[in-house]
Amino acid sequence: MVVLPSGKRLNIRARRRCLRCGASTWHICYGIRYEKPEPKTKFYVKHLFWSCEVCGTASEETRQVEELSEQAMLVNRLLKVTEDYNLRSSTIRVGNGTVTFVAMLSSS
């Protein structure tokens, strides 16, 4: 279980090939870490730490993740707003240098 900076708990479970079992088994992600190789690079290295549910063997997966743009960071923040409030529905539109957010409030 991964704990996000906000304190929320996130379960990530996926079928992956286990080297010890020699088969595709369910794995649990128990940690995620980001690092920036050099200050001037425009990407991060994402480390995901997995454990096989059958034998307990630990493995690490690494990926390159592009640095988020201002637009992507704004969309992520608006997605968090929809989680924090009791909204009937919400819509986010992105295009031509604009981000439009429409929220339908639940009637009390």
Image: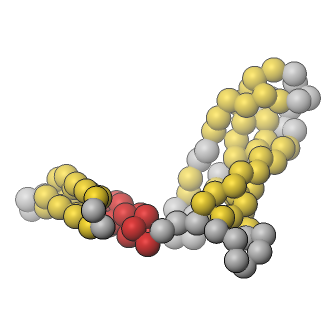
**Which residue is at a point 65% across and 52% down the rendered structure image?**
1
Give coordinates of residue 105: x percent, y percent. 13, 61
Front residue (pair 45, 24): 45
| 40 over 32 or under it: above or below | below
Q: Indicate whether 15 appears above or below 5.
A: above
Of all residues shown, which one is farthest toward the left? 107
**How far across and down, in percent of the image, does residue 28 sit?**
70, 41
Residue 22, horizontal then vertical, whole percent: 87, 22
Q: Residue at x 37, y 64 (%)?
A: 75
Q: Residue at x 65, y 35 (%)?
A: 14
Q: Position of residue 36 (x, y in %)?
A: 73, 70
Is residue 64 in view? yes
Left or right relative to 37: residue 88: left
Numbered circles on residues, count: 0
Viewer-closest of 60 and 44:
44
State which quadrant residue 80 falls in: bottom left
